[in-house]
């Protein structure tokens, strides 16, 4: 099955003055793929992701996301991607329904579509009883699941997830990954940035950034074989410690 | 003691490394004094007026000249009929219209009486009032001059003398107010922010789980701001003496002592605010809304308390700033001493003790 | 006994944070409190560090009652709260000096204890704490918590938000501190860190699920676990969920961890079932339970 590339990056570089945050990275992500984008704090993964979601202009190189160029069409990129981060996902002082309505509105969905979609979402996640409660009162795992569904409201081609399951309890975490598998299966591309290596194990392919460069890019299985270790954590340690 | 000194050293690091708070600390007092001193004033100057002169004779001409010759007014336009008055006001740059009735001179001579109508734009009541008074007094003066040779049957001549601020300089009124605001702001807001910052950062947890005693933390927070507030008070007094030539009639020592009393009062309020706020943002909001607004609006700084509705007058009694402003005016303008100001001082002392006791009671040795 | 916890319960308004918690930590032990966010780890830490008072139960730290002798405890424990609570606008050295002074000591006096850790950040001692990387902040925070030679060290999620390299270094430091006789209670949401502790308590929703050594905990896992993989992960999970004999189906990295209800489970049956579902490249192999498997089994 030959699938098309949803993210295509070639020699992408970002400099801040003398400092090269992202140094000439090249990779592509296929439609429906779960792609792990790993790196230590300060390795440049946040900077790289900001360029891909159209909020930071690259210094040089090429990048296409959802068929749009990051240099010329950053606004179109924003319409065609979803974003969810662990730090901020939903407004705690709005109810579940209000959050859905708000984020649906941001992406220009009509009232009737928002209504229909929020019903589907609430039923799928089994949230009927808490639909009118403040998000702040819900357990973290629930919030993360709702946030992920909200990021998918406008049927984006790619969803960017920033450390989506850090600190979530193991069972909810697996439910979350099942949601990710389902959406990837249905053709949504999933781009996960994280420095939790156990999250990396779930991805189809992962790249590991060290000091602005991509030092490794393969399936977790192959990487473990290549470095002759048991888990991604050790792969990372070997790479980062040199 | 070593602990305590270590703590204070740390506080000074915080203050001197934060440009924003440094600006509030030292930039604001100067900016405020300058602003109130130069820009905001109660005096009128070059107020534009219009004249509707229905008689156009020598007397009216003379009166108009007298009025426009003063620096207070300048004649912007002549109006020819009553209908134009309204539109003149609406255009906006006219504050008053003088209407001289028909045959002004003739009436004055024949009937000993003629009327000038003064119409003022009362959207700004203060200016309207002042304009009214100024025009009236110019008219009165003119009358006295022309009647010099005639012996009236009898006449009461009010002779008013403004004392303590004979030149009616509004800066004299504002300096005590500005000083109060700044001491309140620096002392209360800055301490409450600096304590809540530790809560927000989580460092308060570490401090609590350490042998340093809670009161040492509080005093350590307060001491640097006492110093800074005193410096501020000195800067303001110096500015007002040297730039605005405002005299300090009373004892400088008493002024200093009262200022320190008020600073401690404000600091204890700041601690109290920090015990009820969890974030720097709340502390700032509470300080601004809860302290600054009453200080500006209800302390008698801008609006005289005696002309406030009774409920507000009652509220003003519990505002420390009100008493401090009375004390400041007393010392700086009237030159009175503690024998006169003992009542206000006592009230401030009582309030301070109350706030300190309350904040010690409310201060938590644990997280909840 | 370094830490003694008896029937501790604590509620906040209508939320029960801790329900009847009891356990002990021996002197010189490295004890892990393992559980997700919201399990009650921080509340328990705050009770033990005298910051909160429990609704019910008693607790002793270094033989001091956490309520009655709170002042003594504050002299003898080191505490590193969840966030790296440092003064961001103070330099590395100023932070350390400050904490040394408020504990009535100096850096020189206890330098041997923090030396291992501090030498790594000493080159940056004139840098503001706010400009340090996550790993370095963590080291500085640990140095500050150790500066007064505490008997018991409380570390609340010290490795959250820190990259794997710093995490590994951090655990190596804890091991060395333990050898110096310091009792350490550490909490973490990462199940893989559990194996590094002497003993662990698994905690969820304010309740202790199990307490034992990491080895014993996985040994007592009641089921046989199989690693299952196929070319399509999503369809594999769907199929396994449909399989009537499944006891648990959990995605686990590139595999799915599967347990069966039957004692006489034959993997061949399942293989046949999955093949009929149209799955390709199926792998079914035995695997060992992890702490995470145990946790999920207990939390069910």
Image (spheres, coloured by chain):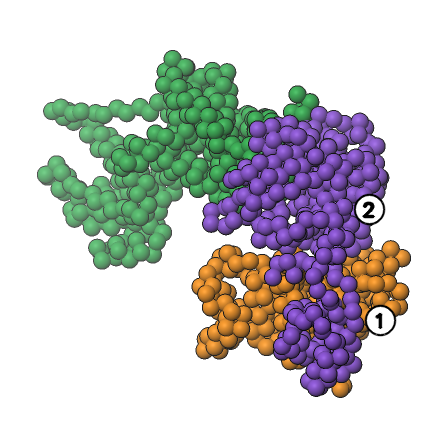
Chain colours: A orange, B green, C purple
Up/down of A179 relative to B56, above or below: below
Does label 1 lie on the same chain as label 2? no
What SS does tag 1 mark? helix
Q: Quadrant of the N terminus of chain C?
A: top right
Q: Chain of mark 1?
A: A
In the drawing, does residue A232 fall left or right of residue B114? right
Up/down of A27 relative to C115, above or below: below
Label ID, residue A222: 1
Q: Position of residue B20 (x, y in %)?
A: 61, 42
Q: Position of residue C81 (x, y in %)?
A: 66, 42
Label ID, residue C172: 2
Q: Position of residue C147 (x, y in %)?
A: 75, 33
Q: Chain of mark 2?
A: C
Quarter of the figure with residue B203: top right
What SS does tag 2 mark? helix
**Mark 2 neighbour density, 10 Å: few (under 14) some (14–19) many (20 or more):** few
Quarter of the figure with residue B325: top left
Q: Nearer the viewer, residue B298 or B73?
A: B298
Q: Nearer the viewer, residue A19 or C259?
A: C259
Q: Are marks 2 and 1 in contact (CB under 8 Å)?
A: no
Farthest residue in the front direction? C264
Q: Residue at x 43, y 21 (%)?
A: B349
Q: Position of residue B234 (x, y in %)?
A: 55, 25
Residue A25 appears in the picture as rendered: no
Q: Residue at x 61, y 46 (%)?
A: C42
Tell me the CA gap for discs 2 and 1.
28 Å
Q: Residue at x 70, y 40 (%)?
A: C25
Label ID, residue C286: none
**Mark 1 neighbour density, 10 Å: few (under 14) some (14–19) many (20 or more):** few
């Amino acid at each position: 099955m030959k699938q098309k590339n949803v993210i295509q990056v070639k020699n992408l570089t970002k400099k801040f003055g003398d400092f090269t945050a992202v140094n000439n990275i090249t990779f592509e992500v296929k439609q429906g793929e779960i792609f792990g984008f790993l790196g230590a704090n300060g390795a440049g993964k946040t900077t790289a992701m900001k360029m891909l979601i159209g909020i930071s202009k690259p210094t040089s190189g090429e990048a296409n996301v959802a068929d749009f160029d990051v240099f010329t069409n950053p606004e179109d990129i924003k319409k065609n991607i979803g974003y969810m981060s662990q730090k901020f996902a939903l407004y705690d002082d709005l109810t579940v329904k209000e959050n859905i309505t708000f984020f649906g509105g941001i992406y220009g969905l009509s009232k009737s579509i928002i209504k229909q979609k929020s019903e589907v979402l609430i039923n799928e996640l089994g949230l009927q009883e808490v639909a009118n409660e403040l998000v702040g009162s819900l357990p973290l795992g629930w919030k993360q699941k709702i946030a992920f569904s909200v990021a998918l409201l406008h049927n984006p081609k790619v969803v960017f997830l920033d450390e989506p399951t850090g600190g979530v309890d193991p069972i909810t975490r697996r439910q979350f990954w099942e949601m990710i598998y389902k959406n990837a299966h249905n053709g949504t591309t999933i781009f996960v940035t994280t420095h939790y290596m156990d999250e990396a194990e779930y991805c189809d392919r992962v790249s590991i950034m060290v000091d602005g460069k991509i030092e490794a890019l393969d399936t977790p299985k192959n990487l473990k074989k290549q470095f002759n270790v048991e888990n991604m954590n050790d792969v990372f340690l070997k790479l980062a410690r040199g | 003691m070593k602990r305590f000194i270590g703590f204070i050293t740390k506080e000074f690091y915080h203050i001197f490394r934060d440009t924003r708070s440094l600006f509030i600390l030292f930039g604001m007092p100067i900016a405020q004094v300058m602003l109130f001193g130069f820009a905001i004033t109660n005096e009128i100057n070059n107020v534009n007026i219009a004249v509707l002169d229905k008689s156009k004779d020598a007397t009216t001409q003379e009166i108009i000249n007298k009025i426009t010759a003063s620096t207070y007014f300048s004649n912007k336009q002549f109006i020819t009929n009553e209908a134009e008055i309204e539109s003149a006001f609406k255009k906006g740059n006219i504050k008053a219209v003088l209407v001289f009735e028909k045959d002004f001179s003739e009436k004055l001579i024949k009937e000993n009486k003629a009327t000038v109508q003064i119409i003022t734009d009362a959207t700004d009541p203060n200016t309207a009032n002042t304009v009214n008074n100024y025009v009236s007094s110019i008219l009165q003066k003119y009358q006295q001059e022309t009647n010099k040779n005639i012996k009236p049957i009898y006449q009461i001549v009010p002779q008013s003398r403004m004392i303590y601020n004979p030149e009616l300089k509004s800066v004299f009124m504002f300096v005590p107010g500005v000083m109060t605001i700044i001491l309140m702001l620096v002392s209360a807001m800055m301490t409450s922010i600096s304590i809540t910052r530790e809560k927000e950062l989580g460092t308060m947890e570490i401090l609590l789980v350490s042998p340093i005693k809670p009161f040492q933390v509080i005093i350590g927070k307060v001491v640097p701001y006492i110093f800074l507030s005193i410096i501020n008070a000195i800067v303001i007094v110096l500015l007002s003496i040297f730039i605005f030539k405002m005299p300090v009639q009373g004892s400088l020592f008493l002024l200093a002592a009262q200022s320190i009393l008020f600073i401690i009062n404000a600091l204890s309020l700041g601690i109290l605010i920090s015990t009820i706020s969890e974030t720097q943002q709340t502390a700032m909001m509470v300080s601004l809304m809860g302290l600054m607004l009453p200080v500006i609006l209800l302390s008698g700084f801008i609006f005289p308390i005696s002309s406030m509705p009774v409920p507000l007058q009652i509220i003003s009694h519990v505002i420390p700033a009100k008493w401090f402003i009375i004390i400041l005016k007393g010392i700086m303008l009237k030159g009175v001493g503690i024998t006169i100001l003992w009542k206000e001082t006592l009230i401030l002392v009582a309030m301070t003790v109350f706030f300190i006791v309350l904040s010690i009671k409310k201060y938590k040795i644990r997280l909840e | 006994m370094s830490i003694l916890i008896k029937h501790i319960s604590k509620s906040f308004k209508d939320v029960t944070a801790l329900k009847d918690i009891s356990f002990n930590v021996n002197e010189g032990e490295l004890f892990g409190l393992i559980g997700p966010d919201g399990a009650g780890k921080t509340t328990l830490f705050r009770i033990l560090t005298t910051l909160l008072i429990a609704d019910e139960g008693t607790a002793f730290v270094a033989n001091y009652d956490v309520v009655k002798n709170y002042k003594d405890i504050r002299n003898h424990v080191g505490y590193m709260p969840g966030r790296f609570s440092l003064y961001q606008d103070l330099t590395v050295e100023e932070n350390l000096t400050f904490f040394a002074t408020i504990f009535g000591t100096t850096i020189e006096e206890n330098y041997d204890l923090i030396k291992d850790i501090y030498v790594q950040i000493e080159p940056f001692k004139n840098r503001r704490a706010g400009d340090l990387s996550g790993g370095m902040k963590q080291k500085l925070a640990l140095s500050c918590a150790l500066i007064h030679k505490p008997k018991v060290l409380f570390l609340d999620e010290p490795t959250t938000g820190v990259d794997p390299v710093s995490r590994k270094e951090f655990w190596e430091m804890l091991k060395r501190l333990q050898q110096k006789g310091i009792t350490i209670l550490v909490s973490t949401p990462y199940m893989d860190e559990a194996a590094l502790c002497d003993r662990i308590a698994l905690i969820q929703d304010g309740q202790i699920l199990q307490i034992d050594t990491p080895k014993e905990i996985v040994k007592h896992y009641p089921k046989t676990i199989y690693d299952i993989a196929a070319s399509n992960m999503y369809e594999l999970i769907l199929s396994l969920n449909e399989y009537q004999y499944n006891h648990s189906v959990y995605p686990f990295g590139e595999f799915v961890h599967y347990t069966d209800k039957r004692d006489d489970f034959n993997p061949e049956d399942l293989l046949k079932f999955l093949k009929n579902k149209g799955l390709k490249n199926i792998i079914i192999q035995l695997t060992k339970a992890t702490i995470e498997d145990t946790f999920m089994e207990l939390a069910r």
